[in-house]
């Protein structure tokens, strides 16, 4: 996988592989001991209906998307559902 600087991801739009716009990247969680990335925290778009999303939400209402679901990073971060 190509290295991508975190500063280039901040605020980037996140879309599911089926074309549903999920929201904008808020932050990335990681395991501090191993350095492994865990989840993308995504601020959902207002029009996104929670019942149509297969991801968990954190206490602040942001989507927790496993990093393993990331398929591509270009104009959008594309994730598998």
Image (spheres, rainbow, N blue to C red):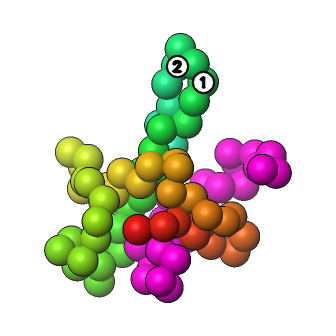
Q: Is residue 66 magenta?
A: no
Q: Nearer the viewer, residue 70 or 15?
A: 70
Q: Residues within 10 Å of mark 1 (few under 14, many from 20)?
A: few
Residue located at (41% from left, 54% from top): 65
Q: CA distance from mark 1 to mark 2?
A: 5 Å
- Residues tagged 1 and 2 counted as in contact (Cβ below 8 A): yes
Farthest left residue?
51
> Where in the figure is residue 57, as x and y percent of width and height?
25, 53
Q: Is residue 10 left or right of residue 64?
A: right
The reply to whether residue 27 is visible in this rendering is: no
Q: Is residue 32 above or below residue 79?
A: above
Q: Nearer the viewer, residue 51 or 6?
A: 51
Q: How many numbered dots are placed on residues in this image?
A: 2
Label 2 belongs to which residue?
32
> Where in the figure is residue 62, as x and y percent of width and height?
31, 55
Q: Is residue 62 left or right of residue 66?
A: left
Residue located at (47% from left, 83% from top): 18
Q: Quadrant of residue 78?
A: bottom right
Label 1 belongs to which residue?
35
Q: Nearer the viewer, residue 57 or 67?
A: 67
Residue located at (61% from left, 54% from top): 10
Residue located at (70% from left, 48% from top): 7
> Where in the figure is residue 39, as x and y percent of width and height?
45, 44
Which region is colored magenta?
1-26
Per the image, label 1 sits on a secondary structure element best described as loop
């Amino acid at each position: 996988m190509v290295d991508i600087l975190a500063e280039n991801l901040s605020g980037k739009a996140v879309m599911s592989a089926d074309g549903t716009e999920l929201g904008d990247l808020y932050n990335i969680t990681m395991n501090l001991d191993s350095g492994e990335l865990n989840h993308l925290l995504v601020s959902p778009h207002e029009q996104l209906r929670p019942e149509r999303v297969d991801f968990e939400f954190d206490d602040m209402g942001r989507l927790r998307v496993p990093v393993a679901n990331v398929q591509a990073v270009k104009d959008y971060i594309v994730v598998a559902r």
